[in-house]
Amino acid sequence: MADPTISAAPHRTGRFGWAPEFALIGGGTLVMFLTMRGNYLLFHTLAELFSIVVATATFVIAWNTRHANQSQFLAFVGLSFPSVAVLDLLHTISYKGMGVFPGGDANLPTQLWIAARFVQAASFLAAPLLLPNARVAPGLVLGLHAALVTLILVLIFPLGAMPDCFIEGQGLTDFKIASEYAISGLVALACVALWTRRRHFEGGSFPLVLAGFALLIVQEMTFTLYQDTHGLLNAFGHFIKIVSYYLLYRAIVVTALQNPYDTMFLRLCRSEQALRDHLGNAEAMIAARTAELRESEARWRALLECSNDWYWATGADGRFVEVSPRAEESTGRPAAELLGRRPADLLDPARPPDDFAVFQDALRDHRPFRRLSFPIASETPTGCWLMLSGMPRFSPDGVFLGFRGTASDITERRRAAEAARQKQTMAALGGLVGGLAHEINNLLQPVISLSDLALNRVGEDARLRTYLTAVRDSGMKARIIMRDVLAFARTEVAVSPPAAVGEAVRGAVELARPDLPPGIRVEVRIDDRLPAVTITTTELSQILLNLIRNACDAMPTGGTLTLSACVVTLRDPEASRLEIAEGDYVRLTVADTGTGMDEATRQRVFEPFFTTKPVGLGTGLGLSVVYGIVRNGGGVIAVDSAVGRGTAVMIDMPMAKPADEPAPANETTSEKKNEKEPAHGEHIGG
């Protein structure tokens, strides 16, 4: 904002200041008054000619100082005066008694007067609106006023379309009086606009302009009262017009001619102050923005430090140039030690490389990559695996700068997947050898029994006793071995804690991913903050693996497999209909975009030994096992499917209680059953 102490005052010439001008104004007023008393027509002509000369002089000054005069308001007012001067000149020569136009009544000059005042009031209202930044185009302003004057003259002279303003013997018409009020209203609005923009005027020009506008209102109010065009009220209105024009002339002359340097100095001071204000605001904005950036950097740094992932970046040569400190937890090396190394330097040559070849191809071809895993050298005997995602970096002109990405330590996840896979393998093996052990035990029973019976009856035949003893001892040894086999097959599984849904789902997906057919995209929408459910992680993994295999079988040409979970609240009557207790449940949904199934098939999906696979490719027990696990855990399972629309399996499982509690009595039985009857993927149409 401009400094209010900065001002530019009009110059005062000599020691008497304004005295010569006041003397001139007083003398001129006396002469005009005496002229009015002697010859009113001469007085009117002199008064109008004065305003015409002032308007013309003001225009000339405004035109010739348009480049130096920085006041767009005064420039616009000066450029609008020629149109007003033309209408005032026609008003003067058409005045009653001049004899220039045929008829010579008072209506025509009054019409021209109203037209001139409307143009003047409209220009005065438009001028303040140009402050502070609008630029005046002189050619455009003059062109618009010329078109407006032409239109007015056409309406008055050839067309005669303008309403009468004065009727001889009656006086002013209603149109004329209403017009004067309308003109006064426009000028009053112009005064308000001037006041709101007063700080944009230089020096003492604002009081002169405001006084000139205000006198125009008084002038127009006076011209609503007269009945005689040569009367005293008419003369008084012309005196006010002379003063108003003089004040406007003074404002433009003082600004454009007498005080150009003061005006320029004031502008420069204001510009300097505004520049200081802008610089202060800019510094404050920069400081605030810097603080925001620092806060954002600290927030993201804290988030990165809290994450299990760590950040890395390579240069164009493929060597690490940035590594976050958390990398030491995964690699066993300080972050500074990794700088300058290549990713290949981390690879564990003693283990299968997994996705490392694809990773190297992406680095070589400058392509983005996601979720590529490979083992890295580690001092731990079980090894360490990383999963990397990255994006190439390019300069604005397209030059390759390197890669930037994140790395996750998936060692524990991989170990869990291996353990789950091994457990399922051992469960399948236990079921197989358990069945064989039962059959062999049945065959050994008569061998051992009959050997004992024969030994009791062999008598003194030592050789036969030796043979029978060998047979019996071999049978007993075989029974001991079979007993050990059955003990292995029936090994009781330790009670597992309630299953964490997010970990179980992601573990099952990772376990099944190597066997997924090409073209199948897996989407997991699981919130890790979901509460645990009542079944064990092993049971939940078995359920998920069965459902994932079924979904893959239903999408032979590829598709999308979606696993999602959320918390739902089941209340009566829905809970009663499902035959479960009221309360909060975790709803696990496994959906595919496969072929789907018809209603008859959907109703039989949980029947034991029901399968749509060819003979020999399925036992029909997979979904039966899933159904049993869910029901034993207190949950409910439902299938939604239609031919060509895909299939969605929804499982609602009760949430586990917060406190650790002993497993249900049927936990061991369930685990045994799951080990003896390994899951089989069921092709049921989706």
Image (cartoon, rainbow, N blue to C red):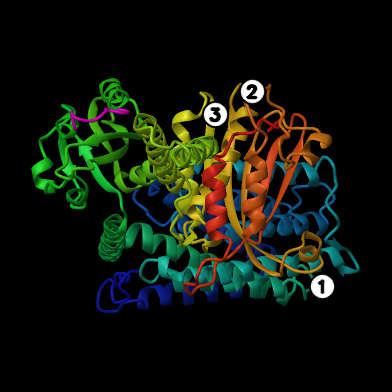
Identify the image quadrant of residue 607: top right
Amino acid type of the residue tagged 2 in the rendering? Gly
Q: Is residue 337 magenta?
A: no
Does 632 sit left or right of 254 as displayed? right
Q: Residue 520 got which mark?
A: 3
Q: Nearer the viewer, mark 3 or mark 2?
A: 2
Disc 2/disc 1 C-alpha distance (Å)? 120 Å
Percent position (x, y) of residue 258?
32, 62
Q: Earlier in the sequence, mark 3 or mark 2?
A: 3
Q: Nearer the viewer, mark 3 or mark 1?
A: 3
Does 471 sit left or right of 209 as displayed? left
At a point 41% along the width and 57% down the height, the residue shown is: 71
Q: Residue 227 got which mark?
A: 1
Question: Which SS class for mark 3?
Answer: strand
Percent position (x, y) of residue 431?
51, 40
Amino acid type of the residue tagged 3 in the rendering? Ile
Does 606 sit left or right of 486 as displayed? right
Q: Earlier in the sequence, mark 3 or mark 1?
A: 1
Q: Residues within 10 Å of mark 1 (few under 14, many from 20)?
A: some
Q: Which residues are magenta?
A: 348-355
Does 583 sit left or right of 52 as displayed? right
Amino acid type of the residue tagged 1 in the rendering? Gln
Q: Earlier in the sequence, mark 2 or mark 1?
A: 1
Q: Which residue is mark 2?
A: 616
Identify the image quadrant of residue 389: top left
